[in-house]
Image (tube, rainbow, N blue to C red):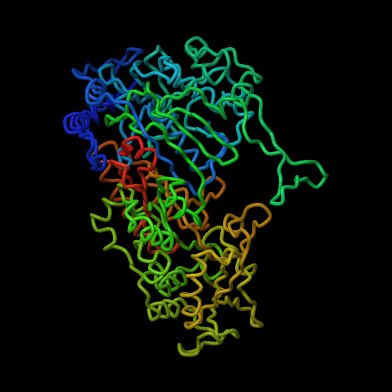
Amino acid sequence: MNFRKLFMAILVLSMVFVFAACRREADTEAPPATTPPQVEQPTPGEVDDTPTPESLHIPFTTRAALLASMPDFAPSGSINQASGTRASINMLYGWDNVATNAQARRLMWEGVSTMESNSRREMFANPMVINGAAGGIEVYNNDDGSRTYRFNIYTDNVWSDGRTITAHDYVGWILLTAHPYYLEIITSPAGSPHMMGRAAFAAGDAPTMTGVRVYDEATFSVTVYADFLPFVWESFVYMSYQPMPLHAMLPGFDTQTQVRDSENGAYLTGLTQDLVTAGINGVETLVRRTNADGDYVTNDDGDYIYDLVGGTGFRFQPTVTSSAYMFESFDPSTFTIVLRANPLFSGTWDGYLPRIERVIFSEHVTAVIVDSLANAEADIVVGQGGGETINNMLTHLVEAGTHTFVNYPRNGQGFLRLHVDHGPTQFIEVRQAFKWLIDRDEFKEMFTLGHGVMVHAMYGIAHWWTQEAIDRGMHDRMIMFTFNPEEAVALLEAGGWTLDAQGNEQPRDFFGPANIRHKDVTNSPQHPGALAFEEDQNVTVLDDGRLLMELNIRWATWESAINPITRVFEALVPHQMRAVGMELTTTRLPNPLTYLSRSGTTPDPTFHLFNQGQTFDPRVWQPWNQVDHNYARSHNLTFTSDPELFELSNRLRFIEIDTDEGRNQFVETFMDVMVEWNRQVIEVPLYADMWFDFFPVWLGDWYNNSVWGFDSAVIRAYDGRP
């Protein structure tokens, strides 16, 4: 067996000792965005014949250094976050993706994950969990091409009920979330096809999960299939695991004795469907649904409709947690979650214990958010966008002296998405001309009221790789597409869009609002998968047999009159398009996104243009999925099948970024991908708005950015009221 060790805990040792030596109790500096130092790797090809990997002796322990740096104090005060997203009843993973609940879950359970990340979301081993002296995280390249990750953990961390967190708790959660009994009741199961043996275990075809082992209280391992290697996000997807308290979740379950190991993999004993259902759901609380007038709502058969508002199971009332906070309550009438500081939490990867006693999540819609903060019905709003709302808060809160703020670019953007497999938008000259006709600077200013920045391709401006690419001159290689109708006309003419509705050649000044451009597409090449010209709604068959395509871009937008992107777009763009002979046909729909993905009853190509917003995952970015022509297993919502763009994007997938060389290769390839994305114009970025956190002047040590988040920031802040 080819064996290599990536002792990931070492990656943070230097950083941790800096924190231990320099951390100040009341400073307001941001958590350092330091890149973990790289470790020289062993020479490839080393052979180890022993069944268990050797341990690496590290003569110091990072956990001890962190514990020594943590002050001894009792948390106090509270912070009430005004959330625009209504919290749900589901406190456990797998039932919904509500942002408010996700923040609460991270505060309750993700502090003892095997991997952690800094304020730039660069990944490294969690020094409070991974025991470097016992071997850290060891990685084996197996003879069949698979890879095994062996985790050596401390057994000093405890659950909020005082029980020790062991390797069995990590493995137990891996097994339970793949178990048929669990999958029977969950609504949003997470697939992990990379994990060896998981598919057979989940299907009930195998009693063990062959790729998961638990050796003792401090050691477990996970094996990944060769087909999924190498993988750029290996450290996050393949090496990041967290424990969950099965002993509290499942009545009578003993994690230490019922999570077992064998030569064929780990397994669970003593489970039944009734046990899993009773433990997780318990007795559910249902209430009759009422309408705005207080009348009961019925279905088409006249039966009452009931809503689930809670229950006695762990899903609704998690009694045991592992991280900085514990669950205290959820009020289904006000959709308010209350968490309380966990006195048994050992601390964060950078040496922090919670300093605020209670964290509250309450619903406050954007229309009343200013009043909510001004009247102290809530304390803080995080990630606030929208120029009008921001200006109102600056005027009524900051100028009043009750609140202050931090702001940062959103790690996302508002943009226009194009379908490029039918109609005129399948031609690159049309897409580029369309982009030249949009005054994107003016659009950004009108939409954000000065609180935004420009972006030029489909990237998140807060990602560390984007920041490094910009520093290396990525934007200098891109087409800026500033407003330029002359450039648009030149592209259209070069592309053959010079015919009138009868197929006759016409001079430049012929085209305008009354005369739309056309193109003879009879012999035009098409990418694989594109809609045949004869079936295209923009194409007319002339008497002489030629296929004539009209330059008419069909836009599906929201029927709501208050959609701000729609309003700004209509004010700036359609008249510029028509001035050069490009038509825009607008269709307002309750949900145009069904046509975007061609889901449900609308599978056929209908529209060419959609307005959207997107916020990127702070840790991972997988552009190859967005341009993969195999639509069934990807997120390709432009329906591009360009082989060059896919091949270029797919290179990123196989880069191992845990070395300086790999990191550099990733940034350079990312730049190449974004330059090509920019040139092809399968999407039109419009702005990345600035996000604001508005918080009371008594809140100390508040630092945030668009990839750090409320749950990371609140652990490190404090209530400064007397």
Q: Position of residue 565 (x, y in %)?
A: 49, 65
Name the quadrant containing residue 111: top left
Residue reaching furthest to the right: 301
Q: Residue at left 60%, top 25%?
A: 313
Task: Mark yes or no: residue 138 visible.
Answer: no
For this rendering, which residue is in front, 369 or 546? 369
Q: Is residue 35 left or right of residue 650?
A: left
Name the quadrant containing residue 222: top left
Q: Is residue 628 above or below residue 55?
A: below
For this rendering, which residue is in front, 251 or 1? 251
Q: Position of residue 613 (x, y in %)?
A: 47, 57
Q: Is residue 189 left or right of residue 488?
A: right
Q: How many marks?
A: 0
Q: Is residue 463 above or below residue 254?
A: below
Quarter of the figure with the N terminus: top left
Q: Position of residue 467 (x, y in %)?
A: 28, 51
Q: Is residue 554 above or below residue 648?
A: below
Q: Position of residue 708 (x, y in %)?
A: 35, 43
Task: Mark yes or no: residue 580 visible.
Answer: yes
Q: Residue at left 56%, top 41%?
A: 334
Q: Is residue 314 above or below residue 582?
A: above
Residue reaching furthest to the left: 21
Quarter of the figure with the C terminus: top left
Residue reaching furthest to the front: 722
